[in-house]
Image: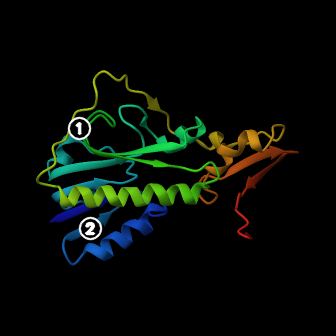
Amino acid sequence: MKISFLCSNPRHPVNDYLYAWIKKNNSKHEIELVRQKKDLSGGDVLFLVSCTEIINNQDRMAYISCLVLHASDLPKGRGWSPHIWSILEGKEELTLTLLEASNNVDSGKIWKKLNFQVPKHALWDEINHQIFEKELELIDFAISNFKSVSPKPQDPDIEPTYYPKRTPTDSVIDPSKSIESQFDKIRVCDPDRFPAYIELYGEKYKIILEKENDK
């Protein structure tokens, strides 16, 4: 098969998982990983992984299937950074959805869903690890079942919900409130790309939360 991955940001932590998957499978398939849609060469399947570009119908026509990996139980949680918003809502079980790309955001037919638990103590990198491992599992499913899967429309009886794009102000921590009350907000923040921070005494302070593994 001819497989393409479009992941917009080379700094995104999912890249290490994609590199490992490609290394494992490049003897069986023709695989490319690109950062911009203009560099796509077409083929059997295109996976959109943390892609920020709009992939229109003309782009999708270069592939038999164009698939999105989205961390919510669609049609609930369409939009940006769904797993982060879900954790901030207090959810401990997340859903990862493999769906077809469409003109309307996150509204395509569904190939498969996976549910998994996220412990209350898990930090951003541990959460990412769970999500990325599940993404690879769905990628394997798509490749193995490429000719036999029967995509299903999203449930029309469920009202879609939408999450907004996160901004740096979504990572601000209130120094007058307890750490416990803001723990979820701190633990989901990537300290390298989108750190949690406080503003105090005219200065801005980056917050880094790490586990002490001394058990």
Query: Residue, x 54% and y 49% (percent of image)?
Result: 118
Q: Secondary structure at mark 2?
A: strand
Q: Quadrant of residue 113?
A: top left
The residue tagged 1 is 109
Query: Residue lying farthest right?
Result: 201
Residue 103: x, y in percent? 25, 35
Query: Residue, x 26% and y 43% (percent of image)?
Result: 101
29 relative position to 125: left or right: left
Q: Amino acid at mark 2?
A: Glu
Disc 2 packing (10 Å; few <14; some 14–19; many ≥20): some
Instruction: Please indicate, yes or no, whether residue 70 appears anywhere in the rendered image.
Output: yes
188 relative position to 139: left or right: right
Query: Residue, x 24% and y 69% (percent of image)?
Result: 31
Q: Amino acid at mark 1?
A: Lys
- Which quadrant is the C terminus positioned in? bottom right
Q: Quadrant of residue 191?
A: bottom right
Query: Residue, x 81% and y 37% (percent of image)?
Result: 177
73 relative position to 192: left or right: left
Question: How far is mark 2 from mark 1, CA to CA?
Answer: 24 Å
- Going from the N terminus, do you reach mark 2 or mark 1 first? 2
Instruction: Work out whether 149 lies above or below 160.
Output: below
| Residue 49: image tag | none
Residue 1: x, y in percent? 15, 66
Instruction: Work out whether 113 lies above or below 158.
Output: below
The residue tagged 2 is 32
Badges 2 and 1: C-beta atoms under 8 Å apart? Answer: no
Q: Quadrant of residue 30?
A: bottom left
Residue 104: x, y in percent? 29, 33
